Amino acid sequence: MKEYFDNLLTYELFCGLIKSELEQFLTCMSCRTVGYKKGETILLAGNPVSEFGLILSGEIEASQEDFSGDRVIINHLCAPEMFAEVLACSSGRKSPVTITALSKTDVLYLNYSRLSSCCKNGCAAHNRIIQNMLKIIADKYFALNDRIGYLIKKSVRSKLSYYLLNESEISGSDTFSAALSKTSLSFFINADRSAMSRELSRMRAEGLIDYDRKSYTLKKPGLLKEMI
């Protein structure tokens, strides 16, 4: 974990901490680091969860099987994101998803019971990290609520218009860099990646938008609003 220590100070969970506070907290929590090979299972659906993980390197995928046995991708995460924190907080609920390493991946695990208990060592960072944790969970709740807005849209174009307008509003500009890659975006709005790419090309050909990789420009935001 030593090679990742300085980067940990940039993680949202450790926002506001200084190096000495983080060192004391990690020692107090008896954190553990686990490395996974590409394709290795990190968490199997049906297993109980008592720890949550911080992705130190690599990328992971959360998937779920529906009633017909088809595999559905739920989420795609990479460093410096966190996973299983909601499950770890939920009184022993079993995981509804299987999490798999998409590449060589290192994960730092923290035990939720230790985090939520009073620190016997008087760790100065403990309360701040709990506050950060609550903020992260609250933000994820609102992000999930926002995602429902995408899922109820019937067409790929309406989903894309909704996403692009939302990203534009967040950035405060009609030209912005999107938070998601094309692959992650297709998962997020529940659309086939090829169909989504074709729709983006049509929207550019019609003069509605322009884009290059994750950079977008909304040329006719008024028309995009009509498509939602």
Image (cartoon, grey):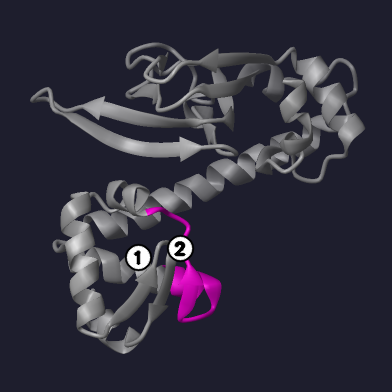
Q: Please tell me which residue lies in front, 55 or 127.
A: 55
- Please report the residue visible at 85 percent of the width from the left and 25 percent of the height from the top: 23
Pinpoint residue 224: horizontal percent, then vertical percent: 27, 80
- Nearest to the eye among marks 2 and 1: give it: 2
Residue 163's disc number? 1
Secondary structure under the numbered disc 1 in the rendered image: helix
Pinpoint residue 100: horizontal percent, then vertical percent: 38, 22
- For disc 2, the neighbor class at 10 Å (few under 14, some 14 to 19, many from 20) is some
Q: Is residue 221 above or below residue 74?
A: below
Q: Which residues are magenta?
A: 167-181
- Left/right placement of residue 170 relative to residue 133 reads left
Q: Is residue 153 visible?
A: no
Q: Is residue 163 visible?
A: yes
Secondary structure under the numbered disc 2 in the rendered image: loop
Quarter of the image where the N terminus is located = top right
Residue 178's disc number? 2
- Please report the residue visible at 34 percent of the width from the left and 84 percent of the height from the top: 221
Q: Please tell me which residue lies in front, 152 or 187.
A: 187
Mark 2 and mark 1 in contact? Answer it, CB < 8 Å.
yes
Q: Is residue 146 above or below residue 209?
A: above
Amino acid type at circle 1 is Tyr
The answer to which image quadrant residue 134 occupies is: top right
Q: Please tell me which residue lies in front, 37 or 73.
A: 37
The answer to which image quadrant residue 69 occupies is: top left
